[in-house]
Image (tube, grey):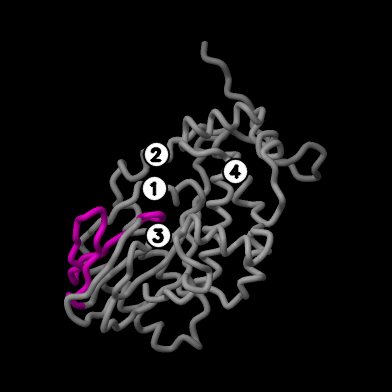
Amino acid sequence: MPDKPSILSVVPAGSAHRVQGHRSVALPGVTVDILTTRKIELEHWELRRLNDPYWRLYWPMQEGGVVEIDGGSTVLKPGTVYLIPPRTTFSTTTRRPFSKWYCHFNLGPAADRAAPGIYAFPATSAHKSMLNELIKLGAKPQSVRFPWVSIQLVSEFVKKLPASVWEQQRLDARVLRAMEFMNQHLGLKLTADQIARHAGLSVRNLNHLFKEEVNQPPMRILLDYRLDEACRLLRHTDDSIEAIAETCGLVNRHYFSRMMRQYRNTSPAAYRQESWG
């Protein structure tokens, strides 16, 4: 005779509420963080080995743009939507002036470590209706507070990505706990011991597990998260470089600039100026 499933209480002991039952489905939380949504007319689009910490969705309105990754070239064609995961190093060029609609977005710490590349999908009539709605909303920005359709459109294409894009996301639960803890406490002076204790590991085992799972030590991942958030704030806010350094736990402007040059091959000020999609 099969064991009777245990009763699950979803409220703390001693609470005035009483909610008990059986958990039949439990899925992880999902984040869709839209950073910016724009239509842009481009005379020139010359980016050189750009590498950003957020996703890009490109929808060209006309031919003319080319994305280059690892020696391969992708001509952006109208009627096709392109996704580029975070940390994909790419360059761009123009064959002629063109326009495109684009979106920068994040999906959360684990999903944002997807396999790099460029992924193309045909746009359906339903997708085109969503895009037309976004373009109309963009024509009267003062009246728009929450362009929810941008989340819907991004989600439509993200779910089309092949399983191979997510293969490297199958990380040990302790690594994911440590990564989430680091990502949520960027402004604090975190130590390896604090991160290890949160993950339920010794510092030695934490370092070993990170080397096995992501091929980098945890403190290097923490620096990546800090630089990622700093890049997001540089590109999408008007916060000063000094304030961004403090917010992201990068000590001060000088240390922030040194880390940007060492690991992102640019300076905070130069990165902020590269705002063309």
Q: Are marks 3 and 2 in contact (CB under 8 Å)?
A: no
Badge 2 local density, few (<14 within 10 Å), some, or many (20+)? Answer: some
Task: Using the numbered discs, state the Cα–Cα distance from disc 4 to disc 1 in whole angstroms.
Answer: 20 Å
Residue carrying label 4 = 219
Residue 105 left/right relative to 160? right
Magenta stretch holds residue 82: yes
Q: Do the residues bearing badges 2 and 1 touch, measured as CB atoms within 8 Å? A: yes
Residue to which mark 1 is pinned: 114
* Labelled disc at residue 51: 3
Q: Amino acid at mark 3?
A: Asn
Indicate the quadrant where residue 65 lies.
bottom left
CA distance separating discs 1 and 3: 14 Å
Marks 1 and 3, the one that precedes in the sequence: 3
**Which of the 4 image quadrants contains residue 61?**
bottom left
Q: Give SS at disc 2.
A: helix
Q: Earlier in the sequence, mark 2 or mark 1?
A: 1
Of label 3 and label 2, which has the lower sequence position? 3
Q: Dot 2 corresponds to which residue?
A: 168
